[in-house]
Image (tube, coloured by chain):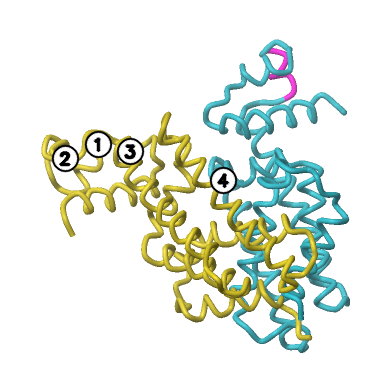
Chain colours: A cyan, B yellow
Amino acid sequence: MDRKTEIINCAAQLFKNKGYSAVTMRDIAQALDIKAASLYNHIKSKQEILVLIIIEIAEEFTRVMNEILESDAPTINKVERVIQLHIAITIRNSDALACLNNDWMHLTDDQLAYFIRMREDYENNFRKIIKNGVEQGEIKANNQEVMVFSILSTLRTLYLWYGKTKKISAEELQKSMSELYLKGITNK
Amino acid sequence: MDRKTEIINCAAQLFKNKGYSAVTMRDIAQALDIKAASLYNHIKSKQEILVLIIIEIAEEFTRVMNEILESDAPTINKVERVIQLHIAITIRNSDALACLNNDWMHLTDDQLAYFIRMREDYENNFRKIIKNGVEQGEIKANNQEVMVFSILSTLRTLYLWYGKTKKISAEELQKSMSELYLKGITNK
């Protein structure tokens, strides 16, 4: 891992534990056991670190969602792939996801607008997947906003829960969550 | 509405918009268009307001969950009633729910411990409902933690989403969300 990645990962953990506003560049240097001056050789500011953490993850979500939307797969597989995307990123980088969820509002100007646009596009693309599924007869003709909100709210807060238990493998989580949202919890 | 309830509602809205830490008793007095001294005739401190907002709602969740758990209804009806409970409180008092979700960690000592215990009991009681449903053959024998987490994460963040749209009635929301979690989104 290069030094810059190390700094970003360390900062994401500090932001998660103390909140972005309460963390100083000095705290980050201390946690890495380096001098503050040395930290500034790699990174200009706390704001720059925040951008690196959040925008990188948001771009990954955006890119994969676009691929899923444009694929020829049935809607059911598309929904499964969206679930898979969130599980994979949650397992790989839950600190950064916590930071994205709690601290995105500390982004400024262009970066803030860029993030909000990506977030809206993401929701809209998921909405299109569901809408298309209803039109194709794969998905029930029930309230689509309730489906979009219910699934995304669970996926977006997965990092809060998964970090606590860790008793379940990615495969088991993928299987259980897909089953739940595609077929419900009741027998029959 | 008595003056104390007015103060609490006004404070809940301010806490939601600015965050508990950023709001002063002076801000609350100003928003109510009364003198700070007059505010202190009704309420001792900002902390007291927070306790009144959060504990009252947490106790309502606790009480209704206990009733649901102890009823003789089939599990499917119990899950529907839990969904109904969250929808009703979200519609009636979304500011207080936002406050509960964002600011509970600002409770202190006994109140904090009491809140955390209620929250844990609530989750455990919902877990028991699901477990019992699996044992009775009403609920699928899939991962129960995934069911508990998925449903509760959606219900707990409903206030974030419902406040934005409001295009859907309580009845429609209840019906769509129950259908989704009980039978899934796919046709067949």
- What whole-number distance in Å separates the C-alpha atoms at marks 3 and 1? 7 Å
- Report whether residue A145 is seen: no
Q: Which mark is residue B120?
A: 4
**Residue drawn at point x = 81 percent, y = 43 percent:** A92
- What whole-number distance in Å separates the C-alpha atoms at marks 1 and 4? 31 Å
What range of the chain is rendered magenta? A37-42
Which residue was labeled with disc 3?
Answer: B23
Marks 4 and 2: which is nearer the front? 4
- Give the quadrant of residue A48: top right
Host chain of mark 3: B
Which residue was labeled with disc 1?
Answer: B25
Q: Residues within 10 Å of mark 3 (few under 14, many from 20)?
A: some
Work out whether mark 2 precedes mark 3 in sequence or the reverse, and give the earlier one: 3
Q: Residues within 10 Å of mark 2 (few under 14, many from 20)?
A: many
Residue B124, relative to residue B45: is it above or below? below
Q: Which mark is residue B39?
A: 2
Label 3 amino acid?
Answer: Val
Residue toward you, A116 or B84: B84
